[in-house]
Amino acid sequence: MISFIRMILRGEFLALNHSENNRVMKPIKISGIIIGMTLIIGGLLLPVRPTLANTPNKQQQAVSTKENDLQKLYEQGVNKIVLGDYQGAISDLGRVIVLNPEYVEAYCNRGMAHIGLGNPEKAIADFNLALQISPDHADAYNRRGVTLAQQGNLNQALADFDQAISFDSNFADAYYNRGKARTELGNYQGAMSDYNLAIKLDPNLAEAYGNRGFIHAHWGNSQKALKDLQQAAKLFLDAGNIAGYQQTLLYIQMIK
């Protein structure tokens, strides 16, 4: 199974800030979680390979070997991102791109490595290159959108999430990310709709339950808020995300 890096606006919830006259919502950063990135091992389709005859000739064998070597180098680069070796990942994925300048996922994941090193502009440049090669690449739009949102360019990020969803209507991460951006912009109704869709597509997306819960709290629906936050806490715990679990418990206490 080929690995890839999943990217959503995670690690930041909206929490209730109590004042004498009202309750307002402000971003709360969860310690120990990389804001905007979550590294998950998942599946990605293999590059298209030429159809081989039952007895491949030497030229076909050479092509297959070259592609396998390229794929191993790509996997090596992705694994280095997971391990936090971002500079090593950039080096490996750069070699992949030299060998195959149209390897879209190499650009996308090199962009992730640039984010890991705190270079969002270089990341955006890589996502732009990926989209030049594949203008309908939903994940490249999603990743660029997350990066733009982290820079505070929420309206540009929304446009990218819209594009991601237009090319993949089942993209749970893009719905969640658009909901997060809409929440930050105060469009709670739109955000609620997006969180609902994200949860429908990915029932294990703890952050979507958490942020939906805070919108319920903002609207004064404490019972619905607690139900969502309790589900978020359970999912965090099931996933071994202790920081997210503990922080969510604190939010539950704030609402009770």
Image (cartoon, rainbow, N blue to C red):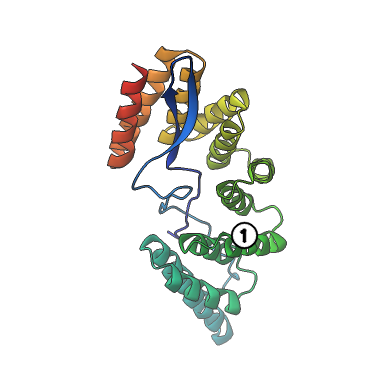
- Residue in the image at 64% along x and 46% along y: 153
Q: As rendered, which of 116 and 110 lies closer to the eye? A: 116
Q: Position of residue 193 (x, y in %)?
A: 59, 26
Image side of residue 118 versus residue 161, left or right: left
Task: Residue 18: name its quadrant.
Answer: top left
Toward which corner of the image does residue 96 lie, by quadrant? bottom right
Vertical arrangement, residue 220 with respect to residue 162, above or below: above
Q: Position of residue 187 (x, y in %)?
A: 62, 27
In the displayed structure, 171 sits above or below 14; it is below
Q: Is residue 48 above or below residue 206?
A: below
Q: Position of residue 74 (x, y in %)?
A: 48, 70
Residue named by callout 1: 124
Question: Which residue, as the protein is rendered here, is positioned at the far bottom?
Answer: 58
Helix or strand or loop: what does disc 1 sit on?
A: helix
Q: Position of residue 142 (x, y in %)?
A: 60, 48
The picture quadrant where one finds residue 158 is: top right
Q: Nearer the viewer, residue 110 or 204?
A: 110
Q: Is residue 57 left or right of residue 15?
A: right
Screen quadrant of the N terminus: bottom left
Crowding at dot 1, Cα within 10 Å, few <14 / some 14-19 / many 20+, comes out as many
Name which residue lies at 34% across and 31% down.
248
The residue located at (49%, 79%) in the rendering is 65
Q: Is residue 106 left or right of residue 246?
A: right
| Residue at (59, 46) in percent of width and height | 149
Q: Give whichever of 171, 55 is nearer the camera.
A: 171
The quadrant of the picture occupied by the C terminus is top left
Q: Which three-letter amino acid code belongs to the residue tagged 1?
A: Ile
Q: Is residue 53 visible?
A: no
For the question of whether residue 198 can be seen, the reply is yes
Q: Does 182 sit above or below residue 122?
A: above
